[in-house]
């Protein structure tokens, strides 16, 4: 398996590492949206959000919270986005689960989705469909 993040973790590829412990590594994105744009990566390889173990996800999200605060302070950001792209259609290009920390500044760019409001029947139908899937798989949920 060729994975640039695994290569960075194993020190076979270079990166500007800003944080590392036994479970997580964080480094600056080489194609930043804004200065300070960082990636937070589990050292264990998981393809996406749906495949990461709950234990690894906990380690990753706690580290992401800590690193986001450090990035915000370091670059004097007014806010930040935490983003995870999952699947090609969602913009995922490296299939090793990670979070982006994107520092935000007043008037830097607009990050707004085009919304598609529900009508009353589609709202109820979507809710029903999701509840059916949750009911089918609720025994595997460990939360």
Image: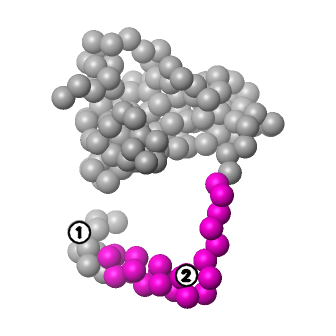
45 or 95: nearer the eye? Answer: 95
**Residue 26 pos. (x, y %):** 44, 27
First of labels 1, 2 by sequence position: 2
Is 132 above or below relative to 29? below
Is 85 above or below relative to 24? below
Residue appearing at x 68%, y 51% in the figure: 112
Q: Nearer the viewer, mark 1 or mark 2?
A: 2
**Residue 98 pos. (x, y %):** 40, 38
Q: Which mark is residue 117?
A: none
Residue appearing at x 34%, y 66% in the figure: 143
The answer to if 96 sits in the magenta stretch is: no
**Residue 61 pos. (x, y %):** 44, 45
| Residue picked out by circle 2 | 123
Q: Residues within 10 Å of mark 2 (few under 14, many from 20)?
A: few
Residue appearing at x 44%, y 33% in the figure: 40
In the displayed structure, does residue 63 sit left or right of residue 10? right
55 or 37: nearer the eye? Answer: 37
Circle count: 2
| Residue picked out by circle 1 | 140
| Callout 2: SS | helix
Q: Please give the range of residues in magenta.
A: 113-134
In the displayed structure, does residue 27 sit left or right of residue 119? left
Q: Residues within 10 Å of mark 1 (few under 14, many from 20)?
A: few
| Callout 1: SS | helix
């Amino acid at each position: 398996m060729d994975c640039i993040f695994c290569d960075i973790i194993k020190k076979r590829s270079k990166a500007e590492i800003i944080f590392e412990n036994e479970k997580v590594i964080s480094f600056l994105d080489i194609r930043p949206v804004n200065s300070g744009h960082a990636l937070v990566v589990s050292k264990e390889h998981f393809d996406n959000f749906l495949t990461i173990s709950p234990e690894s996800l906990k380690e990753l999200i706690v580290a992401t919270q800590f690193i986001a605060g450090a990035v915000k302070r370091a670059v004097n950001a007014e806010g930040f986005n935490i983003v995870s792209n999952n699947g090609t259609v969602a913009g995922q290009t490296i299939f090793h689960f990670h979070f982006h920390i994107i520092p935000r500044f007043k008037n830097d760019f607009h990050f707004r989705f085009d919304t598609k409001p529900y009508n009353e029947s589609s709202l109820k139908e979507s809710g029903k469909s999701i509840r059916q899937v949750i009911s089918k798989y609720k025994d595997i949920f460990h939360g």
